[in-house]
Image (cartoon, rainbow, N blue to C red):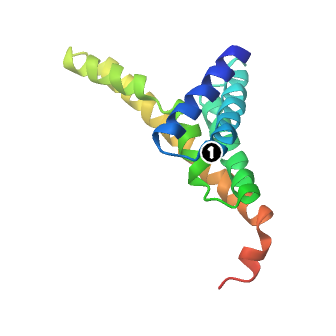
Amino acid sequence: MIEQAVFAGLTTMAFGFLYQVRASLLWISGVIGAVAWGTSLGIHLLPGAGLLGDFAGAFVVGGLAEGAALWKKKPVTIFVVPAIISFVPGYLVYESMVAFLKNNFNGGLHFGLSAMFAAAALGLGLALATALLRPLLRPHHFLNPR
């Protein structure tokens, strides 16, 4: 589990490098990706967790990215985009397309809907983290809008 979290952090840093995130901020993105992946993996180990692990991982990404953005005075997207890439259900979409090409419509529908639900869980986790934590971390922004 720790090994997977470390590799998720390295993957996050690699995507941050591809998106030209400053080198001084890459390690923060890597830590966010590693912690979020570890959280997601830990929840996936629970019986019947389903999409809760994806949701929790995305929530951790959103929450830690909000904190890092406030700490470093940078946009949140610098930390969110590289860290959430590891969670994107690309393999499920690939399997869905392969199943459809092989005329296995039930399998294609299964994998496609699984990918859609996983993407929805990721989006909901990020949105909820932003909606709940940004007003708590930046109350002056919401009390005195310009």
Callout 1 secondary element = helix
Query: What percent of the width, then of the height, locates residue 97?
Result: 28, 24
Q: Which residue is at a point 25% across and 15% down the rendered structure image?
A: 104
Q: Which residue is depicted at the point 74% across and 57% down?
A: 133
In the foreground, 140 or 115:
140
Q: Is residue 109 above or below residue 98?
A: below
Side of 124 relative to 140 (left or right): left
Q: Nearer the viewer, residue 42 or 48?
A: 42
Residue bearing mark 1: 125
Indicate the quadrant containing the N terminus: top left, top right, bottom left or bottom right.
Answer: top right
Query: What is the x, y in percent for residue 41?
Result: 67, 22
Kindly tell me whether residue 48 is visible in this rendering. no
Residue 55 in view (yes/no): yes
Where's the C terminus, which quadrant? bottom right
Circle 1: residue type: Gly
| Circle 1 Cα neighbour tier, 10 Å, few/some/many (<14 / 14–19 / ≥20) | many
Residue at 72% x, 75% y is: 141
Q: Nearer the viewer, residue 117 or 5?
A: 5
Q: Residue furthest front?
A: 23
**In the rendered view, would you say 74 is above or below 65?**
below
